[in-house]
Image: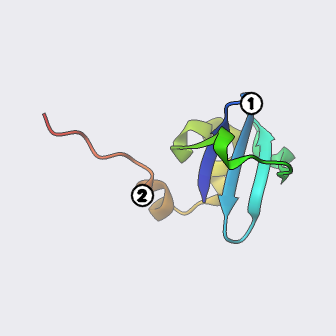
């Protein structure tokens, strides 16, 4: 699953996954439970962000530890 933010709707998260398609949900604690199909989504207005940014919404509860590990950035070389 991938997480996105919209420049037009900063109070919402957008997510895409092969099993769920595009969904939107409030950027608030427990917001994942309020998800609904995303409509009228302009791909030019969304940017992918790390999944961990939505940690308090409940979206991370739907992933395995292996998927969460893939979302951790590697440290930059000095």
SS of the residue at dot 2?
Answer: helix
- Within 10 Å of disc 2 (Cα), the crowding (few <14, some 14-19, many 20+) is few
Quarter of the image with the C terminus is top left
On the image, the x and y values in percent for residue 18 come to 67, 70
Mark 2 and mark 1 in contact (Cβ < 8 Å)? Answer: no
SS of the residue at dot 1?
Answer: loop
Query: Which residue is located at x 75 percent, y 66 percent?
Result: 20
Residue 73 vs residue 21: left or right? left
* Circle nearer the viewer, 1 or 2: 1
Q: Observer-nearest residue: 69 or 8? A: 8
Residue 23 vs residue 3: left or right? right
The image's mark for residue 20 is none
Quarter of the image with the N terminus is bottom right
Query: Which residue is located at x 67 percent, y 39 percent?
Result: 45
Q: How far apart are labels 1 and 2 at the CA level?
A: 28 Å
Residue located beneath label 1 in the image: 8
- Within 10 Å of disc 1 (Cα), the crowding (few <14, some 14-19, many 20+) is few
Q: Earlier in the sequence, mark 1 or mark 2?
A: 1
Query: Which residue is located at x 79 percent, y 43 percent?
Result: 25
The image's mark for residue 70 is 2
Q: Is residue 28 positioned above or below 16 on the image?
A: above
Residue closest to the far left: 78
Query: Which residue is located at x 51 percent, y 44 percent?
Result: 50
Residue 34 falls in which quadrant of the image?
A: top right
On the image, the x and y values in percent for residue 11 come to 76, 28
On the image, the x and y values in percent for residue 15 come to 68, 52
Q: Is residue 60 positioned above or below 8 on the image?
A: below
């Amino acid at each position: 699953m991938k997480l996105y933010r919209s420049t037009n709707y900063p109070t919402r998260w957008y997510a895409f996954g092969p099993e769920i398609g595009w969904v939107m949900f409030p950027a608030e604690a427990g917001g994942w439970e309020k998800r609904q199909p995303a409509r009228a989504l302009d791909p030019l207005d969304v940017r992918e962000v790390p999944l961990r940014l939505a940690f308090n919404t409940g979206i991370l509860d739907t992933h395995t530890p292996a998927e969460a590990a893939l979302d951790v950035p590697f440290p930059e070389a000095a």
